[in-house]
Amino acid sequence: MDNPQRNISPVHKTTEVFGIQREEPLNYSYRESVDNQLIENLTRDKHIVIYGSSKQGKTSVRKHHLKANEYTALTCANSWTLAQLMASLLKQVGYTVEITNKLAISGEAKISVKAKIKAAFMGNGTEFESQAEISGSTSREKTEVALELDPSDVNDVINALDKISFKGWIVLEDFHYLPDETQREFAITLKAFHENSKYTFIIVGVWLQENRLIQYNGDLTGRVTTINADKWTETELRFAIEKGEELLNVEFSEKFKTDLIQESYDSIYVVQESCYFALEKENIYKTCPYKRSLDPDAKAIVKEVVDNQSARYRDFLISFSQGFGTTELQMYLWLLVPIIMSSVEDHEQGLELREISRILKKYHPRKDGLNPGNITQALSAFAKLQVQHRMTPIVFDYDQSHRRLSVVDRSFLIWLNQQDKEELLESVDLPTEIAKNWGNGDFK
């Protein structure tokens, strides 16, 4: 029953509170294990890696603690080489970048960069084009710095940043989309940035592996801090719901909140979207003038939220099963057996290589004759395959150091749990008998 008491708080749009939005949500939930660690490390001059599943608040925590003028951010592309990544960084900080006909020692084409800066006097050893700018009794010079450099040479890039007196953090979003080789090369470059410059990177990626960059370059130990932004406690999820209630002057039933948290599998995305769907069904699009009491069916709404991505997930499984092309072993098709058939609990723990191998040797046509190297090779290319099939955000991530396959899209887990296994197997041309015979501890 609606409460006649009028709410005198400011009016907010529902989209500013619940659902997925570009800006930080007004019901931001402070997580001590994440926020405190970020605050502590922002002043330590170490590079920071924020990692976790997709849509778990990695970008929000960064935006919450850094003002827009305190960082420069760029979104990584899946085709960039290290040189292209560095050239894009220089563009982002204000340089105009042009490719020249000259080759650097690395074999990359050199680039010509120019940036306009204001300076009280001319620097040494740098080409400038200047034009006097006089205002009142103060004379300053607007200068243009021009450099020719090798974008894959970290020393050249640091020099270019120095020339414009760049300040602030450098944020690399979607780092996981970069090709593996680029990620490895950047990990080596990152050490040089730490030792030879004052510039600090904040790297945001979708994976569940704590020391991925250190795995690529052991010299980063002690130079990089990792922050796991994947985990949400029940208290933190509840705070986000109740803060949203306060801002929109609504009150969800206790049953709805409890059921929603249970059905969400610790996904802040599912919680946010479900609350938005619940309010949309009641035509609530902004703060209510009178308190509204609501008692939606949490399980039905979560299913509706996840079903919105059903076509995307089904299309992905079909394209994923085809791998990089037709092969004799059809490894990616058969790797879908443990993925489709494993329980949510198994997926949350991560599927270990030895268990995946055991399952494949049981169900793959080659049986025990299947080469373990083929399995490892296929798992190592999981990220590349997903990017090739334009699966954004990615669903799976393989941790090569711990030999574990993890689902990094919690919505997929909820969706998978709701599907008929036989039907899914049939949709990707796998024998439905697998579902009928599955059990007896196929995953131990």
Image (tube, rainbow, N blue to C red):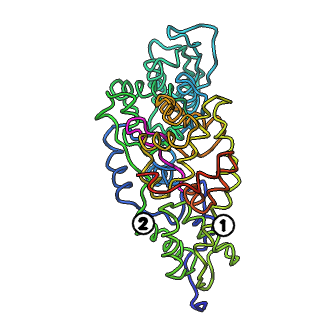
| Residue 304, numbered label | 1
| Residue 236, numbered label | 2
Q: Position of residue 215 (x, y in %)?
A: 37, 32
Q: Position of residue 35 (x, y in %)?
A: 38, 55
| Residue 271, numbered label | none
Number of numbered discs present? 2
> Alpha-carbon distance for marks 1 and 2?
23 Å
Left or right relative to 245: residue 199: left
The vertical placement of 36 against 9, above or below, is above
The vertical placement of 219 against 2, above or below, is above
Left or right relative to 275: residue 235: left
Quadrant holding the N terminus: bottom right
Report the magenta residues as a range.
398-410
Q: Position of residue 385 (x, y in %)?
A: 60, 35
Left or right relative to 118: residue 167: left
Is label 1 or label 2 in front?
A: 1
Circle 2 — which element? helix
Circle 1 — which element? helix
Callout 2 crowding tier (Cα within 10 Å): few <14, some 14–19, many ≥20: some
The answer to which image quadrant residue 332 occupies is top right
